[in-house]
Every structure is written in C-alpha cells, then in structure tokens.
Image (cartoon, coloured by chain):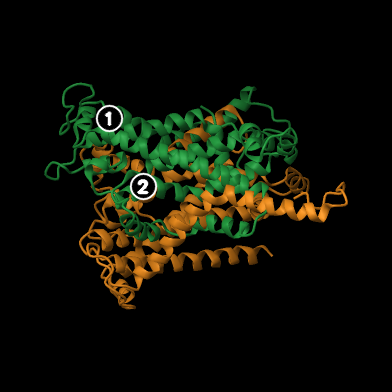
Chain colours: A orange, B green
Amino acid sequence: MDVNAPARPPSAPMRGRFRSGRQALLGWLYATPTAVFVVALFLLPLLIVVKMSLSRWPLLTGDQGINAPDNFTKAIDHRFFTDSVVFTVKYTVIATVLLLLLGLGMALLVQESSRWNNLLRASFLVPSALGLASASLLFYVLYSPYASPLAPVVDRLGITFLGSPNAALFSTVFLIVWRYAGFYMVLMLVGLQSIPADVFEAARSDGATRWQTFRRVTLPLLRPTLALTTVLCVTGSLLAFEQFYILTKGGPDNSTITVVQLIYMIAFQGQNDLGVAAALSVLVLAALVLLNALQMRAFRSEGN
Amino acid sequence: MTVDSKPTSAAVAGTPRAPAERPTGPRKPRGTTIAGVALRTPYWVFTGAVAVVFLFPLAWTAVASVSPQAGTNQVDGWGFGNYTTLADYQAGIWRYLGNSAFVSLLTVVLTLLISFLGGYAFARFRFPGRNLLFLLTLAILMVPYATLLIPLYVLLNEVGLQNSLVGVALVLTMFQLPFSTFLMRISFEAVPRELDEAAMVDGCTSFGALWRVLVPAVKPGLITVGLFSFLAAWNDFMAPLILINDSERMTLPLAVSNLRGQVQGVVDYGATEAGVVVLALPCIVLFLLLQRHYVRGFMSGALKG
C-alpha cells in the first residue's frame, strides 16, 4: 500500500487511517463472493462431514443421532477396505512413477522450440483437453473385445485388456498416461526452462558428459518441479474414481476398487450409509493431509 | 496446430542442447545438410510414432463412430446411425446437451465473476482476514472431491437444491475457485498499480477503474480461467453422478456413461463412440483455438505453486 509513500502531506496519519479503513471495506466488498462460496460450499460441508462421520446417517432417513465411533469401525471393517487401500496405493505408485518419468522424458524430447516440436507438444497435449470420463468411455470401447480395432491381435495372443486383475490395472494406467502425460510434460518444460542457461554452459566447459549434466545439474535444479508434480500426481491418483468406475467397474472380481469408489459404493450403491461413507472420507482427508505434509517436508529437507 | 508459448521459445533458444538432444552445434543450425537430415531422421520417426500413439485413439473413435459395425445402429455402410441412437436415448441428446451447456455456462460465468472480484481484492487491497481467506480458498485443493460431495449432497437437499443443475454449477464453481482466484490474483498483481491510480485520479471510482481499465489488462487471465472452468464443468462426472438422480437432468457425460448396457446388458459400442465424439469435440476445438491460454494456465500454476 502507499501508506508510507515519501511525498505524503503532514496530515498523513489521519488520512492514512481513513484510507486504510476504506481500503479494508472495499477489499471485503470485492472478496465477499469468494468468502460466501468458501464458507457455504467448503467450510460448512467440512463441518457437516465430520458430524456425519460421528452420526448414524442412512441415505434415506438422514440424521439419527450420534453413534461415534461406530462409523469408523464399520468403515475399517468393511470387507473391501483393506483391498481397496492396497489397490489404491499400488495404482498410485505405478501411475506416479510412469507419469513423472514419461513427462520428463517427453519434455526433454521436445524441449527445443521448432515447428516439429511444437506440433509434437500439441499432439501430446490434446488428450488432456478431454474429460477423464470421456477418455474412460473412449478406452472402454477401445478395450472391448467386440468393437476394438485391436481385438484380432489380442484374440490371437489370448490376452484381454480388462479380463484379469493385472490386465485391468495396466490398461487403466495406460489410459491415465495417455490422458495426463502431456500435462506433466508441460509442467516439466516449465521447470526445465527456469534453469538458467549459463549453468549448462559451465557444466559443458568443465567437460561434463551429457549424462553427467543431466544427473548432476538438471535433476537437482529440477527439484521444485519434481516436488510439485509428485504431490499433484500422488494426490490425483489416490483419489482415482472415474477411470475405474467407468472402465473396470471395480472388476474383475472386485480387484480394482479404489478408496473413493468404496466411499461411493457405501454411500449410494446398496449399503446407502452416508455415515460410514463420511467416516471413510474423513480418514482419506486425514491421510492425504498427512501425506502431503510429509512429502513437502521430505522434498524440503532433501533440498537443504 | 502448434503449442507456441512465448516464454518457451525465448528460454529454450538460450539453453544449450538438452541432454536428450542431438549435438547440432552451438549456433542452432537446422538440419539443412544431408548429414544433418540423416542424423535427425531416427528422431523424427521416433517422436512421430509417439505422437501417433497420442492421436490414434481420438482419430479412431471419430472414424469408428460413422463406420459400419455389427450390433450397432450402423450395420451397413457409413453413416450417422450411431448418432441417431444417441439422439433418441431416453430424454434425447438435445436435453443432455442443453443440461451440460447450462451447467457449463453458469459455472463459467460464476467462476469468472467471483475470481475476478476476488483476485482484485487479494491483489489490491489490505483487509483483515485477507491471508486467511486466500489460504482457505487454496485449501479446497487439498480436500478430496468425495469428502465434500457427500456433505454437499445433504446440504443441497436441505436448501431445496437437490437434483438441481444450479446446485451442480454452484458446487463446480467452488471447486474451480482455488485455481481461478490464484490466477486472477497474479494477473492483477502483474498490472502496474499506476494504471488504476491514474484512472482514479481521472475521477473513476474503484469500480469504474476495475471495469474500464483493469478488465482489458487482465483479459488473458480471464480467458484462461473461463477456458479451464468450461472444460472442468463440461467434463465433470462425479458431481452430477452424486447430486443428480433424475434422468431428465443428467449431464452429457453421465448420459453417455449410462447409455452403455441399457438393452439387456448388451453394450451399444457405436452409440458410445458417437457420445465420446460429441463430448470431446467442443473440448478439442477450444483447445486448438486457445492453446496459448491453455498452456499458460498450466505454467502459472507450476511457476508459483
């Protein structure tokens, strides 16, 4: 603010206070819509979900009073709880490793600006404009044994895309890589470009090989980008829903149920218990906050 | 169709060869000599093949949706039979297109309005609770979608917005706020303060300054926010899945997803393909038209995040 601007007349303190009061009022005026949305659609629901997690709350009849900690024990004792946690973590590790490696590799591939590389960047990025649901529907057809153009090949090899647990997992991972690799490529490109050019010059004049430059210069200087992309990718993958809901429907043999899918199932499919679903949501939220804090700390301490 | 971002080319031009690049010399000679072309051919072939992997599913779906296929409405010859199936599905595709368009437009308008005013407030004013409100807005990103949708389902029921497209748009707007408020704030901060002060000296009120002087100055930010909120709202699946249970009010992604397995568990793949094309087309057209804004949206997040 210009409260301490040098060319202020002697009456500055008075006017300054008046102005800052007016400023605060105007600021609040412009921020009011944001505040209304944040309070009504974010903070209030957060309070409600905590209350729901502590109450018996069937889908149809609503609040039936406190029953803590029944919902939490029911959530943890759910027959798919352990399986879905294990599967979600497994999926997250695979998807994160693949997306970060491919994102970085593609960024290095198209880093130099040329017509051809601009064309490549655009084609890597087109799928990211599609919704995850549309992409999942697209691959649902692409993987089907009837309509797929790959059906004859797959038939001859005797494999299926979605028939076995592992095949379903990797088919879904391929869909996710297709949809998101371009996005991570852009983030990596931004990171690569923020590295000053003279660092590379220095490495080259010191006689470093290309691999040494990459290992000792590029990677360490890319740390902030790697931290950001890891946090984004881990968070996104842990909350995976659409791809499995549409593509595998949790099958085969309930082998590809993610935690968020389990929340949805408990709340709206069959069990219809919003209380247990809310309890599981609260657990997921807590795990996510904890995990992100740990990741931030890990990247920060490694940096020092 | 090129992703051409100004900072990209500027920064890369000064960067020495990337580790994965061919050694083409320090002064960037294009592969004009025969040796240069020969050296670059494997690179072209490889990168071209990768690009095909990314483009093939889209191209194939578009072609397959009009090609003949057993078990669909397009058995003999090429044509738009699958689109007819889609058009006649339940309440009809126009209904679902209309629902999706309504939700998307309302989300875009609300997001633009709120993040424009909010970004201005955070960038230009000091008021008690400013930092707390900004942090709370960003904290929306940290909370899982499902964690909020379950209480929102209850909350919207309470206020009579159950099963309502307006309710869906409100929820989607809230989910857009972290990104859009952040982007509008840095857009406003990039505008020199002298600009609005000059306008106020000339007799504009702060709202007048905002409207006449600052809207043009932050237009690129507004385009990016609008584009991202449209794509998010048009494509969103989970919010309408949970908040809408009337088939008349479904949005397009939900309708196309439900379209599968309607007739005694037999999936009409042709109609699904047509549905994917209808869903994807607006997104791809917008992407191609507004690529620069699209890429800049990602970059601003990466730079300051």
- Residue A218 shows in the view: yes
Q: Mark 1 falls on what kind of element?
A: helix
Q: Is residue B218 above or below residue B157?
A: above
The image quadrant that residue A286 belongs to is bottom left
To which chain does the residue with label 1 belong? B
- Residue A188 shows in the view: no
The residue closer to the viewer here, B75 or A265, is A265
Residue drawn 11% across the image and 44% down it: B264
To which chain does the residue with label 2 belong? B
Labelled disc at residue B168: 2
Label 2 vs label 1: CA separation? 33 Å
Residue drawn 44% across the image and 54% down it: A236
Nearest-to-viewer mark from 2 and 1: 2
Badge 2 crowding class, 10 Å Cα cut-off, few under 14, some 14 to 19, many 20 or more, is many
Three-letter amino acid code at the position of disc 2 = Val
- Percent x, y of residue B106: 41, 39
The residue closer to the viewer here, A239 or A156, is A239
The image quadrant that residue B71 belongs to is top left
Q: Is residue A283 above or below residue B143?
A: below
